[in-house]
Amino acid sequence: MEKTKNKYSIIVPTYNERLNIALLVYLVFKHLRDVDFEIIIVDDGSPDGTQQVVQQLQELYGHDRILLRARAKKLGLGTAYIHGLKHASGNFVVIMDADLSHHPKYLPSFIKKQLETDATIVTGTRYVKGGGVHGWNLMRKLTSRGANVLAQTLLWPGVSDLTGSFRLYRKSALEDIISSCVSKGYVFQMEMIVRASRKGYHIEEVPITFVDRVYGISKLGGSEIVEYLKGLAYLLVTT
Amino acid sequence: MKHIVKILTLLVTISALWIGLLQTAIIPRSHTWLLPIYFIVSLGCYGLLLVGVGLVQFPTCPQEAVLLQQDVIEAKEYLKQKGIDVGGCD
């Protein structure tokens, strides 16, 4: 990969991800060899010993490469990013999930895309050629498709995957966008990208695959659908 | 301009065109009266079609699950070698 003086801060919020965070850190180091980066782990007081594992990883990889910025209790995703962002020393920030549904092997393609296009935001999309999802049943796929068509028709966001959260931001842009976002959960991901799009930031997409390892648990129940529709209405009138 | 205003502007424009058609009676009024129904039905069909096509062409990646499993095994072995205890869950 092309050598640059860019530094990438990877922010990973965790809650009870003792095993996954170790696997994730290993895979990030495996796939980002010639890149200057740091991993900022924002742990919300996991009772399973996530922080102890992170401390061991710090000993192994270095305290300057792995930063543990814990919080006392579960305080939500949006504030976790803001918290991590305060400690980020890179000029680019990557946001990804700890549960390995976002594979670190795609990090080089995010960085490459950014370098090629000088984009402000590179967002991972599951809905194009080369991308995909594994581990979803028909109902989950149907809800996802329906939600996407609805959002595309109503919001014209200019990106194909609104609720994915594997993204690379220029740090200044993320700071700008995140301060105006108020939603929670995955509506928050949608709000971030819609606001970014409205503000006129240059957004590019790269295909990613999404392997859902939590089989059998539908994350999209009735209340989530209601939350989603409320989020959509909120974005319609505020952006 | 807020997005809802854009959409409302679009709807008002379409309504204005429709009222214009009613007034000028270029096509028979009985047809013009039915146009909004056609509009809503075709909008619904368009949505259903998009969802249907999206569902049929939903990109899946079963091979990725296998690759991830291999990565997990590789990472676990490395971490064990380095004395990092990740056992006890999953």
Image (tube, coloured by chain):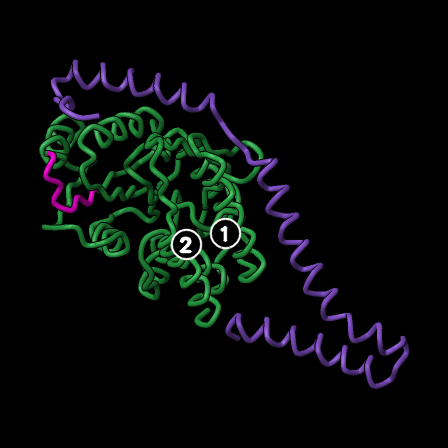
Chain colours: A green, B purple
Question: Which residue position is annotated with label 2?
Answer: A225
Question: Which label lies toward us, 1 or 2?
Answer: 2
Query: Where are the magenta residues, as a range?
Result: A41-48
Give the tally of numbered discs. 2
How crowded is the residue under tag 1: few (<14 C-alpha within 10 Å), some, or many (20+)?
some
Q: What residue sits 19% from the left and 41% below the top?
A: A15
Contact (CB < 8 A) between labels 1 and 2?
Answer: yes
In x, y percent, where is residue A224?
Answer: 37, 53
Q: Residue B58 bears which disc, if any?
A: none
Q: Residue A42: within the magenta? A: yes
Amino acid type indicated by mark 2: Ile
Task: Give SS at disc 1.
Answer: helix
* Label ID, residue A147: 1
Q: Is residue A77 left or right of residue B11?
A: left
Q: Is residue A108 above or below residue A164?
A: above
Q: Position of residue A3 (x, y in %)?
A: 40, 34
Q: Residue at x 18, y 37 (%)?
A: A16
- Percent across and percent down for residue B10 are 65, 73
- What distance separates the C-alpha of mark 1 from that of mark 2? 9 Å
Comparing B48 with A36, the one in front is B48
**Residue at point 17% right, 26% down?**
B89
